Image (cartoon, rainbow, N blue to C red):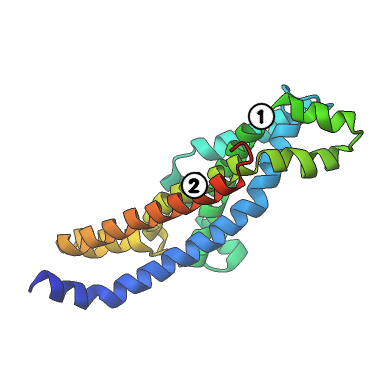
Amino acid sequence: MTFSKNLMEYWPSLLTSLTETGIMMSISMGMCLLGGLPLGLGLFLANPKVKNKYPWLYWVLNFVVTVIRSFPYLLFVIALIPVTRSVLGKAFGPIPASVPLSIIAIAIFARLVEQVLLDVSKETYALANSLGTTRLQYVWHFLLVEARSGLVLAYTTTTVSMVSYSTVMGVIGGGGIGDFAVRVGYQRYEYGVMYVAIVIMIALVFVLQMFGNFIAQRLDKRK
């Protein structure tokens, strides 16, 4: 069977796998933004390098984030199967697969947010302090505004990383383009189909990175 016939035969499965990847990425990156940004902000505000009254909070948050990020991802996914089943009632499929993806995304993004905020110049705080702003006003009107370009790049980097992480979700029946490449391309010796899936993943990462760079450049007020 020729390559074109093979591709046409597996095309419906390829589209299904792309849909599964889209579901996993949409859920995990939504949770990443909702959970990672506040957590990263908490890490920054509690950081000993920043004036704070609760340095113990930083070490607690830092410990949690570090443990999650250093946990071998495949083992992390397997270890969360009982938790996912108890919460969602099932442990297999693209939606349950989004649970470990979301947790990893939150941890990675939170650490990147902390690093971006630490790079904000001290003059920004001095200006906000001279205007008599509250902590909330400083964070919302000065800190996040000053760091917005870096935050977009951090979110883009996390998104690209999650595309890579999502490729192993076939272990718990999450499906996705990575699972398709292994299950159809490698295990059935359809290497041409496998290379098509790989090219699609590379193209997806390229588009996401370029889009993130474009948005960050538009938001960068240093130009």
Closer to us: 219 or 178 = 219
| Residue 78 seen in this snapshot | no
Dividing the image into 4 quarters, which one contains the C terminus? top right
Image coordinates for residue 38, horizontal then vertical, percent: 71, 45
Identity, as a three-letter code, of the amino acid under mark 2? Asn
* Residue at which label 1 appears: 118
Q: Secondary structure at mark 2?
A: helix
Spatial separation of the CA atoms under disc 1 and disc 2: 21 Å
- Tell me, yes or no, whether the two marked residues, 1 and 2, touch with CB atoms within 8 Å: no
Q: Which mark is residue 213?
A: 2
Q: Please, what is the three-letter code of the amino acid marked with disc 1?
A: Leu
Residue 8 occupies quadrant: bottom left
Q: Position of residue 123 (x, y in %)?
A: 75, 26
42 or 4, which is in the foreground? 4
Identify the image quadrant of residue 65.
Answer: top right
| Crowding at mark 1 (Cα within 10 Å: few <14, some 14-19, many 20+) | some
For image coordinates 57% across by 34% down, the residue present is 66
